[in-house]
Amino acid sequence: MNLNRFIRRSLLVLFAVSLAACAKRASLPPIMPDSLDLKALAAEIEPGPLDSLLDSMPGWLEASLGGGDKKYHQPQSFYDQAKQIVEDWKDDIPDLSLDNLKLMLELVRGFFIMERYAQSGAKCNLDCLSVRATIYNTLDIPMFADREGFFGQIFSFMSSALTDDILTQGQTSELLNFVHQVFSKARLHHRQFAAKILRRAPESKQAAKILYQLSGRAADKQDFDRARLLHNAAMHRTREAITAERWFSLAGYCYRGLDPTCGDLALANAKKVLGDEIDDKQKETIESLEQAAAWADQLQKMKDVSTLESKLKKAGLAFDLGRTQEAGRMYAELNKAHPKDARPYTGLAKVALSNNLRTQETVRLIRQAANLENKDLEYYEVAVGTAFGSFIKEVLGPGVKDPDRLLEYMEPFLKTTRADIDGLAKFDPKRAAILALMVDSGTSMIMVSKQEDNPDQHKLALQLIKSAINEAELLKTKYPTEPDIYRMILLLTRFLGNKKLAFSLVVAEPPAGVKERTELNMLRAQVMYLLMIDFNDSAQLPKLRALIESLPRTAEKNFEAASLEADVLALNARQAQDKTIWAQAERAYRKLLKHCKSEQRPRLQNNLGVALYEQGQVADAQSSWEESIKAGAEYEAANINRLVAKPAGDSTAKLEAYGLEAGLTALRYQARAWVIHRSSLDKKEVSRRLAELHKELFSDVFLGQPANGYLGTAIDGAFQVGFGYSTVEHLLIQLEISPSAWLVLPAPITQ
């Protein structure tokens, strides 16, 4: 299951999207007077003296974060680095996620170096205090601090995984306890710096930022009146024009606080600020706020209800509006009054899920209701969608410790999940059929993957893929407009191993009536691109280019399509050995770099370097690779390219090292292939060593084509296949792919 999407979508987002740099600005004043006494607020939130969290940091962890490096003992260096990290985030709270590991690591690094800066005795001005406050505000992640929440759910799994391969048992325990302490005490440290800023400069822009942060935390606690008060005070201290996103936030607090007049005014102001320049994300936010307004209106009209059905509806409205504490109290009362009815249990399960992702509690409540009356569609959606909670505890945790018994651990989990899917079929046969195929095919594939000693393993896997595609084709005839069926076929196509059949499936256009046609065409383009790399076949290039050009270029989708287009140009240039096409790729990457997020910059800067190098612009290429490394490239593509383009005395030894350490297998292969290429070996020995290298790195690939980077492309990104439950969208099925191409100069002997 893909936890990141589940986490991101499980929160009821009624406000606050990322700042739109190009948004039209209008000077609109706050809609309420400012009555907040900031000095009194500072006294209220001040936690008193606090010890540095670094005092409990294990020594080995400090060393791994750079504690032994001389530059970490220079106070100004500490501050400059931390400030740059925070400035790169752009927003008050960046989009931390399991997928965005680089940003998570940057957050930890920012925390570490700012604490060391503080311990150096250097003075901390307003900007410095703001940086420290922002870091701790970002570290304030309740589900990581809650032992019963997300952190507690995966504690045993993480312990097993880390201890077996990376750390000692003692180090694992020290690490996880330290991380939990940081997350659990982050709020106190944030309040400490917030109080200092509010006392020192209550009318400053830094104070405004603090007030926005505090308002968000008040909303997290569902104290919407306080959130509204703090947000309004921040607006009064905002020196520039108030953005639409700030008005969105206020509207959300108002609607959730059952103050529709305030919400309507704030939403109207947001629309005035935007004018006609509304992107997809802002449109989605407006729609969610309008829905929140309707829920708030309905909830206010249901003050006195008496029947079970009306009380369930009222609790459901409170939950949908984000008043989950209130909804929990209502469901608890209904559960007590109607102990044989499954619906209050379902409501309590949803509340548990919204409370820091307490999945074990959610699963327990759902299983308690398994033999009760009135198990409706919502019950089965929650039961199936939260199955990952029991999967982590009952399968993944023990499976890491004892992998040989993984299938044994899976058996009861699969039996329960399959029964829930069968129950779902009574209400939603279409999605139940898709889920059944996903679970059955996935289980069979896991069984085949365990047969490492079976010489027919690859053949069995291909048979499973073909069988799954055939079953999906049958479902397609039954449900011709269901996009998830087409998604499943497209994803399976990548592993089919049959070039002719694979391309025929991916080239075929979905019928006109199919839902989410644009998203499907994007997926088609992504899979077609990967197939071209797998089979070194450029025959479909005109169709791929035409497909990409046909994609709607909305603000949100434009970057994704343009990025794929640039990567396709690079692949075409490599296959055709054409400098003119490399020049087109260069222009495409430069355009992307003007609008990319910070986490996308390392890859794009690396790829631009390759495009420049292939046109003979070696110095500019080296500069671009240096920028990639400076921007925090998580893989070694830029380092490998630098060493290949400009060999130095120790470049071969460094390539050998990257051949062992690089994050992508294709990069490791190419780095070591360059070492072989530079050696004085005859053709026979070169062929033998390449064969050995290929066997070493790709012997465990029992499905699909080994990606060794021979076309100058290393693919980062995996298929995201799973299902979960969202408090907004309910049962979710995820069938996606997110390929990111890292260009590398391929060794001639691999061409």
Image (cartoon, rainbow, N blue to C red):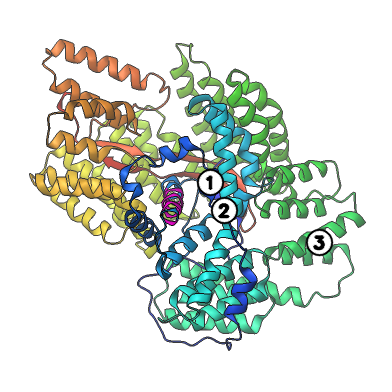
Q: Does 392 sit above or below residue 404?
A: below
Q: Secondary structure at mark 3?
A: helix
Q: Which residue is mark 3?
A: 329
Q: Which mark is residue 51?
A: 2
Callout 1 touching callout 2 (CB < 8 Å) = yes
Callout 3 touching callout 1 (CB < 8 Å) = no
Earlier sequence position, callout 3 versus callout 1 = 1
- The image shows residue 554 at horizontal and vertical percentages of 37, 64
Q: Which mark is residue 535?
A: none
Asked whether 421 falls inside the magenta stretch, the response is no
Q: Nearer the viewer, mark 3 or mark 1?
A: 1
Q: Quadrant of residue 205?
A: bottom left
Give the Cα separation between the discs numbered 2 and 3. 37 Å
Q: Residue, x 42% and y 70% (percent of image)?
A: 126
- In the rendered view, does 701 fall on the left or right side of 267? left
Is residue 490 shown to the viewer in this render?
A: no
Q: Which residue is mark 1?
A: 55
Q: Secondary structure at mark 1?
A: helix
- In the rendered view, does 125 fall on the left or right side of 361? left
The span shown in magenta is: 106-118
Crowding around mark 1 (Cα neighbors within 10 Å: few <14, some 14 to 19, many 20+) is few
Q: Nearer the viewer, mark 2 or mark 3?
A: 2
Crowding around mark 2 (Cα neighbors within 10 Å: few <14, some 14 to 19, many 20+) is few
Give the quadrant of the C terminus.
top left
- The image shows residue 679 at horizontal and vertical percentages of 14, 19
Along the viewing direction, whichever of 541 and 526 lies nearer the viewer: 526
Q: Residue, x 49% and y 79% (percent of image)?
A: 270
- In the rendered view, does 26 fall on the left or right side of 538? right
Q: Amino acid at mark 2?
A: Asp
Asked whether 116 falls inside the magenta stretch, the response is yes
